[in-house]
Amino acid sequence: MSAEPSAPIVDLIYFNAGGGHRASALALASAIERAGLGWQVRLVNLREMLDPRDGFRKLTGMDPEDLYNKRLARGWTVGLAQELKLLQGLIRWGHAPLVRQLQRAWLEREPDLVVSLIPNFNRALYESLASSLPGVPYATVLTDLADYPPNFWIESGLPIHLVCGSARAVAQARAAGHAPQHIHATSGMLIRTAFYDPPPLDRAAERALLRLDPHRPTGLVLFGGQGAKAMRQIARRLPDTQLILACGHNAALADALRELPSRAPRLVLGFTPDVARYMQLADFFIGKPGPGSVSEAVQMQLPVIVVRNRHTLPQERYNTHWVREQGVGIVCPSFAKVDEAVQDMLARLPELREATRRVRNRAVFEVPAILRTILEAAQLPPAERAFSAPAPATSNAAAPSARYRPRPSRRPDGPPRVRP
């Protein structure tokens, strides 16, 4: 008796370094469910694949990503470009054992499609998958607006599907020698659907409930889930500007900001999952040039004030060029003159806000359709696998995957078996 056909299993690979990769994975998982594709989606932390017994945490009392996240919170980012090269060298040096560990993980997991939302490890992830489960397609969704070559997001010489959120990233993929059928352009970065259809609210009434002036220009200051010490400098230099300061999980920072004197009303927040709501209450955004936060702000029609200097993460430097090219904000050399940037912002607010309206980011609806086509193409006989990009979506929902055929197990070490 044959087993019942099972839904395709799609693994989304993320890690917690910086928070943006997990946020993108969650956004994509939600978008796949919203599209009605009927897939079984699994969020997979790369750390758990590489260290399934949690040895690093048991030895040190923390996860490897915690070290990186603490540095971001404290602003200790000078020199990260050089450290990145060291990390990449270590990954190449340990490539063979890394691939062997990942092979074991794939043979246990048996996905039908793997989608990476992380940089640096894509060669090891792809080669381990291809050697342990031949034929399972692999895609990398860039969660940065551009690559930081070499060997960051885009790996040369491998038939990896690349989902690129900017013309710059598409050009980089072509320059690296990737075939056109493996390059998939989207209109921006993955962000949660909450930023597309937030519930209506009365801004004046909501501000008043939060003890903010209903009619005063308001800035949202946001530096990711751990906050950043730069927020203190910004708050000190803007005593007359109404601010919403989102500190994430950094309770000590929130307490310090509440103690700072201010002549304008302020709202200091701890961690909140409802960033879209507070963006609705603001008029402009101040923060680091992270691809996620900048994309969320622009989607909510908030012009941005960001900084580019030696403290800026190397993979985020292109984002400041994008801000200038799109005309959606102001790029400063530091926050030392953030007061002048705010005055400039307020003087040009209608112009800058109009520029944000011209940015049409539909990536969260486009990526599921791209992945569906990749998965369906992998189920076809080799002679029929000429890949074509999906037709432009006419709605927020993609049609269910009609051509998917459940496959026997691809494990090379035993007889074929169909998953129940």
Image (cartoon, rainbow, N blue to C red):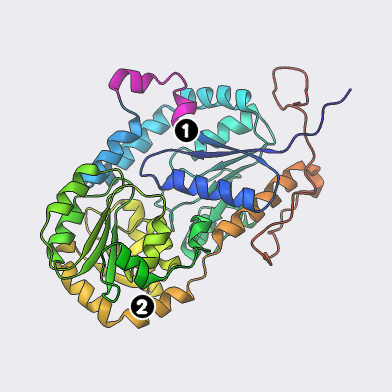
At a point 78% along the width and 22% down the height, the residue shown is 416
Q: Nearer the viewer, residue 197 or 410?
A: 197
At a point 63% along the width and 57% down the height, the residue shown is 180
At a point 25% along the width and 44% down the height, the residue shown is 250
Give left or right: position of 198 versus 37.
Answer: left
Query: Foreground mark, 2 or 1?
Result: 2
For residue 290, above or below residue 394: above
The kind of residue tagged 2 is: Leu
Image coordinates of residue 175 in percent, x first then y, are 51, 57
Image coordinates of residue 160 in percent, x first then y, are 59, 45
What's drawn in magenta, residue-wise? 46-61
Is 56 included in the stretch rendered in magenta? yes
Residue 76 showing in the rendered view: no
Residue pointed to by mark 2: 352
Q: Nearer the viewer, residue 155 or 401?
A: 401
For residue 226, above or below residue 304: above
Image coordinates of residue 80 in percent, x first then y, are 27, 44
Residue pointed to by mark 1: 46
Residue 126 showing in the rendered view: yes
Is 194 included in the stretch rendered in magenta? no
- Main SS of residues in magenta: helix
Q: Nearer the viewer, residue 190 or 203?
A: 203
Residue placed furthest toward the right: 1
**Mark 2 element type:** helix
Image coordinates of residue 235 in percent, x first then y, are 17, 60
At a point 35% along the width and 44% down the height, the residue shown is 18
Q: Quadrant location of the C terminus?
A: top right
For residue 44, above or below residue 268: above
Q: Quadrant location of the N terminus?
A: top right
Circle on res. 301: none
Earlier sequence position, callout 2 versus callout 1: 1
Within 10 Å of the Cα at label 1, are there few (<14), some (14-19), or many (20+) other Cα atoms? some
